[in-house]
Image: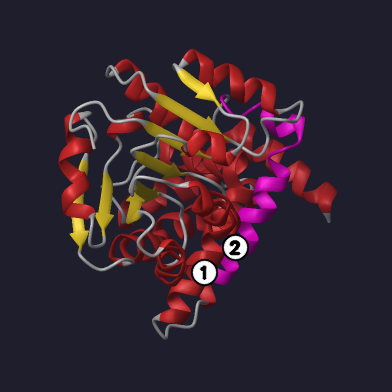
Amino acid sequence: MPNVRPTFCFIGFGEAGRAIAAGLHEAGLDRMSAWDILFPQHEGEKIQRAAVASGVRCADSAADAVRGADLIVSAVTAASSVEAALSVKPHVAGNPYFLDINSVSPGRKQETAKLFGSAARYVDVAVLAPIHPARHQTPMLLAGAHAEAVAPTLTALDMSVSIAGAEIGAAAAIKMVRSVMIKGIEALTLECFLAASRAGVIDEVAASMRNNYPGLDWAKMVPYNLERMARHGERRAAEMEEVADTLRELGVEPLMTSATVKRQREMGQIGKQQTVRNVLKEGRAAMLSAISAAARDRH
C-alpha cells in the first residue's frame, strides 16, 4: 500500500464520511471514492455535490467504489453495518484495510471481521468525539491485528489515532461503554430541564446544579445537549441500542441505557418539527419552550 497517499473509499457518505473526506482533501489527499445507498435517489444529489466539492469520486455502486482502494471506511448507520460489509466483500481485491468506524457493539464488529476472513484487513475504529469541527483529526481508537500496521498511514494524513488493543472489539468497547454516560447525560438533561421549563424554574435548577458540579457550565451544556439530540436523536437512539447489546454481552442489564434509547428517539422525532428546528440557535429558554410544546402535541 502506498505509505503516504493511499486511495480511500467511503461506504456511506453521511455526516461522518463527508467530514473526514473534506478534511483529508484539505490535507492533500486526492484519490477518494464513495458510495452511499442514497446516491441514486433525489435526496442523494446534495450528498453527491458535497462529495465532488471534497474531490471524491461518486461511484455507481459499492463494487465500483472499492475498486483499487487501499483503505475502505465504513461509515453507515449502526443497523446497516453488516449489510454494508456484505455489499463490499465480493468486490475487494488487493487485501485492503477495512476501517469500521460504525458505532456498534464489540460482538457486531467481531462478526463483521469474520465475514471478510483474509479478503481484507479489518480494523475496529471508534470515533471518540463529535466529528465537527476536527473532521479527519477527530480522535479515533484503533483495535485488531492490523491496527498497528495501518496507524502510521493514518498519522501521515494528520489523523489523530491511538491503539486500543490487538483484539477486535477493544475500541468498540470503550466507545460503547462511554456512551452510557455521554448520551445518558444528554437524555437526563432533556428530562430535567423540560420539567424545569414547565415548572418555571430553569434558572434556579441550573444555579443549584452548579453547587454539585462546579466544573460544568450548564449555561452551555443544556443547549448543546438539546441541539445534538434534536439533530441526531434517532441515529443516537440506534447507537444506544448497540450500547445495550454491549452491556448484555458484558452481563450488565441495560436499564438506564434502554431508557436513554427511548428519550433520544423521541427527541430525534421532535427535532424534525420546524418549530423546534427554527430555535436551535436561539438559546436554552427558546429551545425548551418549543420542545415542550412539541412534546405536548405528541401526547
Q: Give the range drawn in magenta.
A: 257-281
Characterize the local packing of mark 1: few (<14), some (14-19) or many (20 or more) Cα atoms within 10 angstroms: many
Residue 264 covered by magenta stretch: yes
Image: 151 above or below 112? above
Q: Where is residue 66 in the image (x, y as percent from the top left)?
A: 47, 38
Q: Do the residues labelled 1 and 2 touch (CB within 8 Å)?
A: yes
> Which quadrant is the N terminus positioned in?
top left
- Indicate the amino acid at tag 2: Val
The image quadrant that residue 7 belongs to is top left
Q: Is the magenta stretch mostly helix, strand or loop?
A: helix
Image: 158 above or below 289? above
Image: 267 above or below 118? above
Element at label 1: helix
Separation (CA) of disc 1 from disc 2: 6 Å
Q: Pick the residue in front: 7 or 207.
A: 7
Residue beneath the point at 39% across and 65% down: 117
Q: Where is residue 29 in the image (x, y as percent from the top left)?
A: 31, 21
Judging from the image, the colouring scheme is secondary structure
